Image (spheres, rainbow, N blue to C red):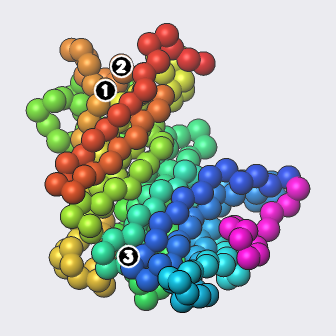
Amino acid sequence: TGHDEVGPEIGASDVLRSATFTSDSLGTIHAVIEIEEATRSPKHTLYYAYAKRKLVSYNPSPVYEWTWDTAPVAIPNSSGASGKYDLRQPSIACDSNDRVHLACRQVVTDGNSHIIYTTKLPSETNFIDLPPFTLDPKDWGDDRWSKVNKTTTVPYESAENTASSTNHAVRDCDAPKVCLIGDNTPLVFFRGGIDAGSGTFGDRHNDAIYANIGRNDTGAFDPSGRYRFDPAKAIHVVGIHNADQFPTTNVIYYDAVIDENDRAFVTVIKDNDGRS
């Protein structure tokens, strides 16, 4: 870590996998960095870092600089004896009350991946500790971290993705993106599909885009209020086709934004020829 180096010092066998940035009302830049560490199990860890804005000149107009001198800190993983979480693909956004919203992918070995979420309040120096380890975060008793997606128990199931319902389920998901509604309420998009290891349908071959809206029990404008998600509220946005109602769009990339009228726009790139 140095003047303009973002992230922790890593070993020769470690890999920087991804990073996401946002800024608050004071000009502070917040970052969450994903590091794959060779000596750690599981190998993927998220680090939080920030750089405060400094005024360096008034003439002829204000000039600012940002330095990353404060050492990044690992987002506290589970302290339980049953294991730790493998966290990847972070996405963050800062709202009008300077809360930082984080969504990321929880990877489970020989199991389904999940999208999880938490809020960092302005008074906190880091994101809060993850709850004790569990394979499915729907079992968490502490809703300061919450699960975003709903998981189905079968490779694909039409009843879990009917167009008339609002609780759509997937077997595996990745690529979360946090957007804000009305400058405060988080809306998390993610890519989801049937079983990632399905021999019938291919590895991540049939995917769709889903979304879920966060909830704050104390009100969107309470700066001390945290958001949480109800997995049963997840809904597909792009990619559910035909009578079987499972993902067939083959989404390989997507992006999503919310405009000043709180309308969401989602664009996807499809691969009709399949992919390995």
Instruction: Count neighbours of disc 2 (C-alpha within 10 A) and say few if under 14, some if 14 to 19, many if 20 or more.
Output: many
**Going by the picture, which residue comes out furthest to the right?**
12
Q: Which of the labelled discs sits on residue 239, or is there none?
A: 1
Please state the horizontal and vertical placement of residue 170, each as a whole percent of the image. Answer: 36, 36
Please indicate, yes or no, whether residue 244 appears anywhere in the rendered image.
yes
Using residue 49 as the reference point, say whether residue 25 is left or right of it. left
Q: Disc 3 designates what residue?
A: 99
- Mark 3–mark 2 Cα distance, whole angstroms, equals 37 Å
Q: Is residue 267 above or below residue 60?
A: above
Provide the secondary structure element on which disc 1 rests. Answer: loop
The stretch in magenta equals 1-12
Name the foreground residue: 134 vs 259: 259
Provide the secondary structure element on which disc 3 rests. Answer: loop
- Mark 3–mark 1 Cα distance, whole angstroms, equals 32 Å
Q: Quadrant of residue 116?
A: bottom left
Please indicate, yes or no, whether residue 212 appears anywhere in the rendered image.
no
Q: Disc 2 designates what residue?
A: 248
Instruction: Count neighbours of disc 1 (C-alpha within 10 A) and say few if under 14, some if 14 to 19, many if 20 or more.
Output: many
The amino acid sitting under disc 3 is: Arg
The amino acid sitting under disc 1 is: Gly
Q: How many marks?
A: 3
Q: Quadrant of residue 9?
A: bottom right
